[in-house]
Image: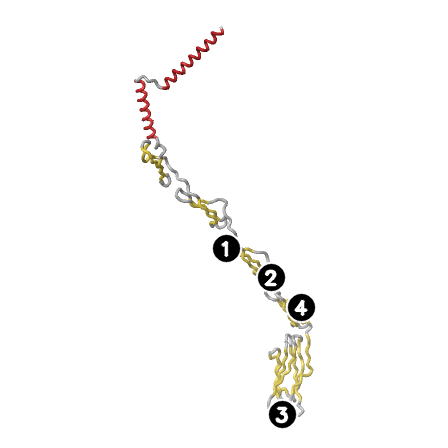
């Protein structure tokens, strides 16, 4: 063959071995008759990293010894480039690790996974690796971050007792308003307008209840006569509020009968006096006087009769 050929040999170590040893040598191909040496170039890769290289290995060269540390190696690859021959690996051996107990390299936390390994008891190389699952948070008690008020919600949180990270949070509902026991007079009532009283929240001071206060009564002064009199009804009286100057006017008709009554009585008095005067001048006795005389006469007659009875018994 006039051209170089390339071939590979793969070893699946899978982290189980600590060392590799062997001898590299070439051999003839049965149908090759050329006198030229094969001159092979050999490269050995451990997980794609070049660990060994030897050029010019041929039929006439001594076997090449190889000793490699393959600790922590998953794949070992032997690459051969040459012609008119093939490579042999003789007396090759792989020494396996002797794993010890599991050791924790990195402790697991509440958020990150940890790592544990098994090391070879002879070379201390890592034989196996395992992941430790992240721990769950250990929530503590609720801690109030923001107090709830009548106007806004509050907030509380729980923190992990191990790592102190927040692991829960929730809102706190608004508080209900709580009104004062006593009313506060915001605006005093007057005799012309209503007043206002309120109750406030003892927490936030916001007004939660409002009521109207009825108007007060007018504070009137004394009555004064504006017009009219007993003889000239109606009488008009007026009084004024001391607070707002409002006026109250009243027409009094109670004395309307006074004037005509006095005139009528006066008329009858004059008429009676005149009649009696005329009767007396003419010698005419009044009925009342004649009646008195009549009853006096009756009494005397009765007394006389009684005297006669007593004398007759004698």
Q: Which mark is residue 152?
A: 1
Q: Secondary structure at mark 2?
A: loop
Which residue does the numbered mark 2 point to in the structure image?
A: 137
Asked if residue 195 lies left or right of residue 110, the reply is left
Label 3, on which residue? 36
Q: CA distance from mark 3 to mark 4?
A: 56 Å
Q: Residues within 10 Å of mark 1 (few under 14, many from 20)?
A: few
* Distance in Å between CA atoms under marks 4 and 2: 25 Å
Q: Secondary structure at mark 4?
A: strand
Tag 2 or tag 4, which sits nearer the N-term?
4
Say above or below: 89 vs 170: below
Badge 2 or badge 3: first in the primary sequence: 3
Foreground pick, 228 / 221 = 228
Secondary structure category for the residue under label 3: loop
Residue holding disc 4: 102
Residue 232 occupies which quadrant of the picture?
top left
For marks 3 and 4, give the one nearer the viewer: 4
Which mark is first along the chain, 1 or 2? Answer: 2
Marks 4 and 2 in Cβ contact (< 8 Å): no
Q: Nearer the viewer, mark 2 or mark 1?
A: 1
Q: Compared to 47, does 30 lie above or below?
A: below
Q: Which of pointers 3 and 1 indicates the residue nearer the eye?
A: 1
How far apart marks 2 and 3 lie (CA) works out to 73 Å
* Distance Cα–Cα, label 1 vs label 4: 55 Å
Q: Residue at x 64, y 74 (%)?
A: 72
In contact (CB < 8 Å): disc 2 and disc 1? no
For discs 1 and 4, the disc positioned in front in the rendered view = 1
């Amino acid at each position: 063959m006039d051209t170089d050929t390339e071939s590979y040999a793969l070893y699946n170590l899978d982290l189980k071995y600590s060392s590799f040893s062997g001898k590299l040598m070439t051999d003839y191909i049965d149908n090759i008759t050329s006198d030229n040496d094969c001159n092979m170039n050999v490269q050995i890769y451990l997980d794609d990293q070049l660990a060994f290289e030897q050029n010019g290995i041929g039929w006439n060269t001594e076997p090449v010894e190889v000793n490699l540390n393959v600790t922590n190696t998953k794949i070992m690859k032997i690459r051969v480039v040459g012609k008119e021959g093939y490579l042999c690996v003789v007396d090759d051996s792989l020494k396996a690790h002797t794993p010890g107990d599991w050791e924790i390299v990195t402790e697991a936390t509440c958020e990150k996974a940890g790592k544990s390994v098994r090391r070879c008891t002879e070379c201390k190389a890592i034989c196996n690796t395992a992941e430790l699952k992240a721990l769950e948070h250990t929530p503590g008690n609720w801690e109030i971050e923001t107090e709830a008020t009548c106007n806004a919600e509050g907030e509380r949180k729980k923190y992990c007792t191990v790592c102190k990270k927040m692991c829960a949070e929730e809102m706190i509902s608004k508080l209900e308003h709580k009104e004062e026991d006593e009313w506060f007079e915001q605006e005093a009532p007057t005799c012309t307008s209503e007043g206002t009283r309120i109750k406030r929240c003892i927490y936030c001071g916001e007004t939660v209840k409002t009521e109207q206060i009825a108007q007060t009564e007018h504070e009137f002064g004394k009555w004064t006569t504006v017009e009219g009199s007993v003889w000239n009804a109606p009488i008009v009286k007026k009084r004024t509020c001391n607070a707002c100057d409002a006026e109250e006017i009243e027409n009094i008709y109670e004395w309307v009968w006074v004037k005509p009554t006095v005139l009528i009585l006066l008329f009858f008095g004059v008429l009676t006096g005149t009649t009696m005067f005329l009767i007396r001048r003419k010698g005419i006795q009044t009925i009342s006087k004649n009646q008195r005389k009549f009853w006096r006469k009756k009494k005397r007659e009765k007394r006389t009769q009684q005297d006669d009875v007593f004398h007759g018994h004698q």
